Image (spheres, rainbow, N blue to C red):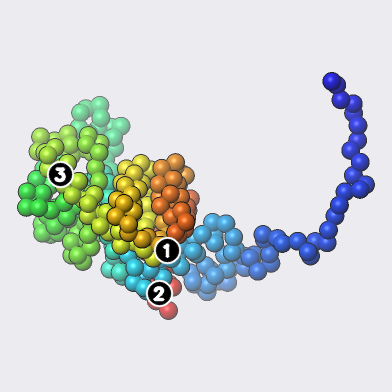
Amino acid sequence: MILPYDDFDLSAVRRYPLASRESKVRREHLAAPHVAGSGLGDWLSRLPKLLAARDLVDVVDALVAAHARPAPIVWGLGAHVIKAGLSPVIVDLMQRGFVSALALNGAGVIHDVELALSGGTSEDVDAALGPGAFGMAEETGTGINTAIREGVARGAGLGRAVAEWLHASAPPHAGVSVLCAAARLGVPVTVHVAVGTDIVHMHPDASGSAIGEGSLRDFRHLAASVARLAGGVYLNCGSAVVLPEVFLKAVAVARNRGIDLAGLTTVNLDFLPHYRPLTNVVRRPTAGIGRGIHLTGHHEILLPLLAAAVVERTSV
């Protein structure tokens, strides 16, 4: 069947008055121009009440509300957050009481330790791989592996073992170390590793039994923190696979025990939307009981902005 070039008759289409329609964007949602010298708090209030701008303000609201209740605020940090220069921002939030517990991956520990020890981290992999030097800094491998072995032997998890060792060693750049701040402030820090992914696993000091035992203990520590997250906030910053998977399993064991997580807000911050964070952090854990929010942006811009907004809101 071949159709002709007919014109559809539009003369009888049904129409309605514009004022009778419910519109998703209204004048009260629109942005207001910035006023010079008015400050960050005023700038935030002038954002449009729509889309990602609304989500950003909602995350600030959730953090401030959790802090005031009080309810836990648990942060999951990928290594990029540390090597993008954001540890001083995280340390400041810890000191202000906006971090109840921290979960890191193995690379996050490495970057934090190297910053604390030497004031620098993130080697040039392309330049170091060919000569066989990649990942072979002695202090990094020996220090972290010794801390894990000795700490796990006395009953600590991997995160606590390294944090307490680093803090006790009084490194010259302790002020920018998330791990040192955690030990100093008593903030639980857990580390969740995949064996073979981190440079310290290439060193002869590495103990598979200690790494595995320490990381398993840390899963149980994180699960205990997650079980207290009713009315609180969990933020996943820059981990696309490991921490979203670990967080989902922690939620699963809490639910298995019949623990109510009502009012939980989860937040994913990253410069790309990935499947596991969107599914295992934003959508699944909050279905029917809370809200999940995804903010897309570079960590080095988005995290300082979020932290500054929280500081502005709570310093009034």
Whether 137 is drawn above or below 313: the answer is above
Identify the residue position indicated by label 3 in the image: 213
Q: Choose the circle earlier in sequence order: 2 or 3.
A: 3
Using the numbered discs, state the Cα–Cα distance from disc 2 to disc 3 in whole angstroms: 40 Å
Crowding at mark 1 (Cα within 10 Å: few <14, some 14-19, many 20+): some
Percent position of residue 53, x then y:
54, 60
Q: Amino acid at mark 3?
A: Glu
Percent position of residue 253, x then y:
29, 50
Between circles 1 and 2, the one closer to the viewer is 1
What residue is shown at x 72% (from left), y 62% (from top)? 22
Mark 2 in CB contact with mark 3 (< 8 angstroms): no
Q: Nearer the viewer, residue 7 or 55?
A: 7
In the displayed structure image, the side of residue 178 where residue 5 appears, left or right: right
Whether 69 is drawn above or below 24: the answer is below
Residue 243 appears in view: no
Q: Which mark is residue 314?
A: 2
Between circles 3 and 1, the one closer to the viewer is 1
